[in-house]
Amino acid sequence: MSSVLASALGPNWLCQNGSIAGKPALGSNRVREYHLDWKQGTGPDELALGKAAEGNGVCMTQWIYKFGGGSADGRADMKNLLGGKGANLAEMASLGLPVPPGFTISTDVCTHYYDNDLTYPDSLSGDVDAAVAHIERAMDAGFGDAGNPLLVSVRSGARVSMPGMMDTVLNLGLNDQTVAGLAARSGDERFCLG
């Protein structure tokens, strides 16, 4: 089995040994099978797919999809994977609209959680850390940095709209230390406390 970064291929990929050939998996319009045989070495077929992930035969799923800065890992047609908000934010970012940088945790994480004894994917924590670092670089601020705090909002999103059913967390990262830094940067303490 081989592993390929899903961002180089599009949405979630099921990897199996064999020759290069792609076809939609049964019953799904977003999951595709992609067969790779790495025993042939790194040739033009592998290069055409984009960057290969390291993994010694482990197929890696992309759990996080970043957006902002004129690019995005996702697309508008990926609502089953990214939810309505995530897919539309990705599309707007791809079109060059001024979308603040962010990331979407795919709906496959929820599926994995319930299919694997209420556990998250092993790589999810590291993937989230990398996505937060992406936002920090784009915003030139640091999550938890008292002098230059990065604040984020966390919004839920489903494959279909469910108004009023899910909560939003605003100003995640605001605490006693970061509020002082935000007040100093904005020049308005009332702005930070209101």
Image: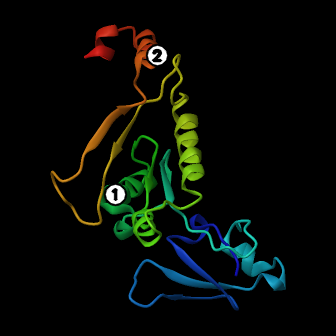
Q: Measuring 41% from the left and 16% from the top, which residue is drawn there? A: 176
The mark nearer the N terminus, 2 or 1, is: 1
Out of 110 and 142, give the one closest to the viewer. Answer: 110
The amino acid type of the residue labelled 1 equals Asn
Pointer 2 residue: 177
Label 1: element kind: helix
The x and y percentages for residue 128 are: 53, 48
Q: Measuring 30% from the left and 56% from the top, which residue is drawn there? A: 157
Badge 2 density bin: few <14, some 14–19, many ≥20, Cα 10 Å: some
Pointer 1 residue: 88
Contact flag, marks 2 and 1 (Cβ < 8 Å): no
Q: Which residue lies furthest to the front in this view?
A: 117
Return the mark for residue 113. Answer: none
Q: Measuring 53% from the left and 70% from the top, which residue is drawn there? A: 10
The amino acid type of the residue labelled 2 equals Gln
Out of 180 and 84, give the one closest to the viewer. Answer: 180
The x and y percentages for residue 172 are: 39, 33
* Quarter occupied by the C terminus: top left
Distance between mark 2 and mark 1 Cα atoms: 34 Å
